[in-house]
Image: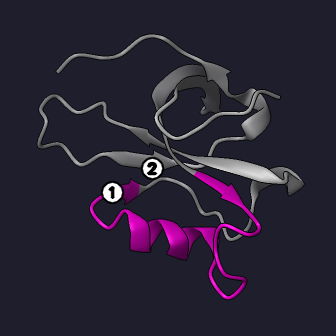
Amino acid sequence: MTDFKIGDLVRWESQGHGSIKIKRGQVVAVLTAESFQKTHTVWRFAKKKFPNHRQLFDGWSLPYNQKVAYLVEVRDGKTERAVPKLYLPDPRKLKKDHYRRKI
């Protein structure tokens, strides 16, 4: 598994309804057990730090018993005003990406 830092461009494959889709985004938070208080969940942490984002995960803890996880912002709207999306992908599936989408 590669270590990522805030600002890194990443991509991963997600699966749903019988199809595979490649998603691309930018790491906006690196989460470890120490990065948020034990009384907070990943979901609450994301809601507090990124209130204008749409959360597309239901993470109450770090995914798949990993020691580190990454919140990834995906901006795939047609305009700059589109609401960005937050994902909490499986860290083992993340890969470095160099593609930056232009709006």
Q: Secondary structure at mark 1?
A: loop
Is there CB contact under 8 Å for labels 1 and 2? yes
Q: Quadrant of residue 54?
A: bottom left
Residue indicated by mark 2 = 86
Residue farthest to the right, as pictured = 65
Q: Secondary structure at mark 2?
A: strand
Where does residue 39 sit, x and y in percent of width and height? 67, 88
Circle 1: residue type: His
For marks 1 and 2, give the CA distance.
6 Å
Where does residue 29 sit, x and y in percent of width and height? 53, 51
Quadrant where the C terminus is found in the figure: top left
**Residue 77 lies in magenta, yes or no?**
no
Circle 2: residue type: Leu
12 left or right of 54? right
Height in image: 91 above or below 12? below
Q: Quadrant of residue 26?
A: top left
Q: Identify which residue is drawn at 60% across, 33% down.
A: 17
- Segment tinted magenta in the rendering: 30-54
Task: Please rate how many residues cluster around mark 2, counting C-alpha atoms within 10 Å: few if below 14, some from 14 to 19, many from 20.
Answer: many
Q: Identify which residue is drawn at 42% across, 11% down.
A: 99
Where does residue 43 sit, x and y in percent of width and height? 55, 69
In the image, 22 versus 28, the foreground residue is 28
Residue indicated by mark 1 = 53
Q: Identify which residue is drawn at 41% across, 67% down.
A: 49
Task: Please rate how many residues cluster around mark 1, counting C-alpha atoms within 10 Å: few if below 14, some from 14 to 19, many from 20.
Answer: some
